[in-house]
Image (cartoon, helix red, strand yellow):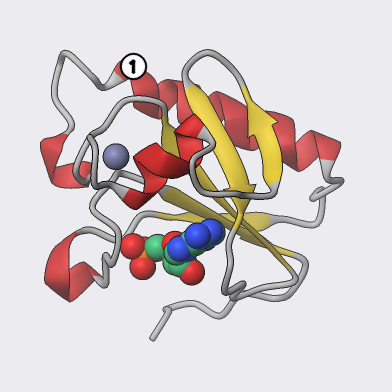
């Protein structure tokens, strides 16, 4: 999608600090980290939000979780981590391309605010 921030990051039109990449998934450091380690993991196709996941594209979600496990090993996150997807206005989603936040290296309160 031409005017999508994360599509531009995937294409390299906007710089990012790459954490992981494969044929399906791109992961980069969040520009406004909410934890000492904060990566954003996105599918390499434009899916607007978690509300748009269907039978055709749900494979990307499993690929994203495979990436989570690989990043966690590579970054030594054995103490734990949290994966969060914000969806829509009440969910606090600010970028309209499906993404998963991977947060780690501090104790993460539950329930979140
Ligand atoms: P959300 O608010 O859940 O939609 O998450 C969007 C995330 O993208 C936020 O945590 C932002 O800090 C992050 N973000 C926005 N622009 C950039 C960028 N250019 N590079 C890296 N992360 C970004
Ligand atoms: Zn996009």
| Viewer-proximal residue among 3 and 99 | 3
Q: Is residue 59 above or below residue 91?
A: above
Q: Residue 43, percent across and down?
A: 40, 30
Instruction: Please identify the quadrant where the N terminus is shown.
Output: top left
Q: Quadrant of ligand 1?
A: bottom left
Tag 1 residue: 59
Q: Is residue 53 above or below residue 113?
A: above
Q: Residue 65, percent across and down?
A: 51, 31
Q: How many marks?
A: 1
What's the residue at 60%, 37% (across, down)?
68
What's the residue at 79%, 50% (across, down)?
77
Q: Residue 91, percent across and down?
A: 22, 69
Q: Residue 71, percent across and down?
A: 72, 37
Secondary structure found at label 1: helix
What's the residue at 17%, 13% (across, down)?
56
Q: Is residue 83 above or below residue 21?
A: below
Q: Is residue 17 above or below residue 90?
A: above
State which quadrant residue 26 falls in: top right
What's the residue at 58%, 40% (across, down)?
27
Q: Is residue 60 left or right of residue 40?
A: left
State which quadrant residue 18 falls in: top right
């Amino acid at each position: 999608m031409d005017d999508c921030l994360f599509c531009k990051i995937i294409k390299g039109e906007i710089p990012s600090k790459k954490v992981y990449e494969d044929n399906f998934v791109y992961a980069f450091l969040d520009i406004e980290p909410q934890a000492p380690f904060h990566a954003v993991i996105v599918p390499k196709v434009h899916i607007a939000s978690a509300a748009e996941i269907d039978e055709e594209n749900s494979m990307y979600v499993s690929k994203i979780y495979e990436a989570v496990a690989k990043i966690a090993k590579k970054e030594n996150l054995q103490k734990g981590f949290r994966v969060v997807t914000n969806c829509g206005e009440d969910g606090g989603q600010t970028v309209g391309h499906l993404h998963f936040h991977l947060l780690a290296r501090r104790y993460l309160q539950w329930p979140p605010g």
